[in-house]
Image (cartoon, rainbow, N blue to C red):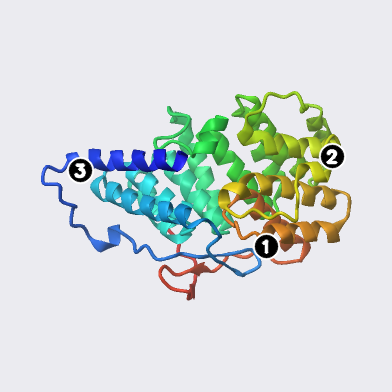
Amino acid sequence: MKIQTYAIFLISVLILSCKNDPKGNEAVLDPSLDPMQGKALAVNLMGEKLQEWNDPDSVKNLRMFQIEESRRIYLGKLDDPKGYLIYGRAFLANGQVENAIQIFSKGTAKFPEVPDLYLYNGEAMLIGRQLQPAIDQFWKAGQNMEKLTAPAGISGLSYRDSIAGISLQFKNYLLMGLAFQCNRDLSSADKMFEVCGDFSTNPDLWVRSYYWQYECYNRSGRQKEAESLLGNVSKTMQILPVSRSYLDAMLYYKGELQEKELVDLNALPKSSDEAEDWLVRAYAVGVKNLLQNKNEEAIRVFKTILSTGFWNQLPFIAAEGELARLGGVEIKQPEVIELNTQDKKKPVKF
């Protein structure tokens, strides 16, 4: 039902866009304004290629439909930042990181005052493991959010994020915190996760903030503060289903849930939708083993997470960062996969 609703929404927007063109013709534009839609794979923190993740064909087909429809909107509204956001986010949802970065970068160049564009460009770079460039984009987003009037931004947030009440500011600082963490700057990561608390307006957001603060505090020498977070959560908290995995993870850290009650590490998710909650829970198991100095078990859990293939999701990126750190991998500016090819190239600077 959610998929059908979203598809209907996109079609409706397309129809409205066509109405603005009395001839009903698609504009003829410079080809550079419409990047090729070839699959843009990323490279992980260990230097390995990240391939397309598994999803049902119906989900994959819908993502391609969304790219085509958002492309039409983008081409018809080159003077509207919303078109860049919709088009870039459609690419990003399909794992086409470099296509998304190219669209968002065009958007930030044309609309330098729109924070949404910097935020999603940073998200694309983070998912593409381009950590420092991502951090730079998040800083720019934050600087431009002082005048933000729409908490969800001009293109809205994803279904699950909107249900939880996430704002553009919360999303920005959460992603920046993760980028700092993967870049092994735990002190800065702590600060960003704390800022998320400033934008937490309901229990769902508080428990999400605690989830990331707890694991980061424990490894940046702030164990007492980490433990104090556990006193803020309880089984009776009023939490929506989209945030339940975060609360359960905190209860697991607190000792009120056992691992077998939290997650079955042998039952790997079979779709990106299933993976969202499973990865949140599984990452907590890896972290708890890490905090108990059970490094071999932590590595096993983190490798299990990576075996799922859902590399665009935040706990996956965090687990990858832990494996790179435990394996002594030096964090470097990653090579970027060229659009429409499997060849590697140096990162593009915008």
Instruction: Identify which residue is drawn at 88% across, 55% down.
Output: 294
Query: From the viewer's perspective, is residue 207 above or below residue 312?
Result: above
Residue farthest toward the right in the current orientation of the protein: 293
The amino acid type found where label 3 is placed reads: Cys
Seen from the viewer's position, the closer of residues 90 and 259 is 259
Residue type at the position of mark 1: Ser
Q: Nearer the viewer, residue 75 or 240?
A: 240
Q: Which mark is residue 307?
A: 1
Q: In which quadrant will I find the C terminus?
A: bottom left
Q: Quadrant of residue 103?
A: bottom left
Residue 334 pos. (x, y %) = 57, 66
Give whichever of discs 2 and 1 has the lower sequence position.
2
Callout 2 secondary element? helix
Mark 1 falls on what kind of element?
helix
Q: Residue at x 79, y 48 (%)?
A: 285
Query: Mark 2 — residue?
Result: 223
Left or right? Give the position of 33 relative to 166. left
**Disc nearest the viewer among 3 and 2:** 3
- Point out the residue furthest to the left here: 23
- Tell me the distance, in whole angstroms, between the alpha carbons under discs 3 and 1: 44 Å
Find residue 227 and report its horizontal and vertical position in percent.
84, 34
- Residue 18's label in the rendered image is 3
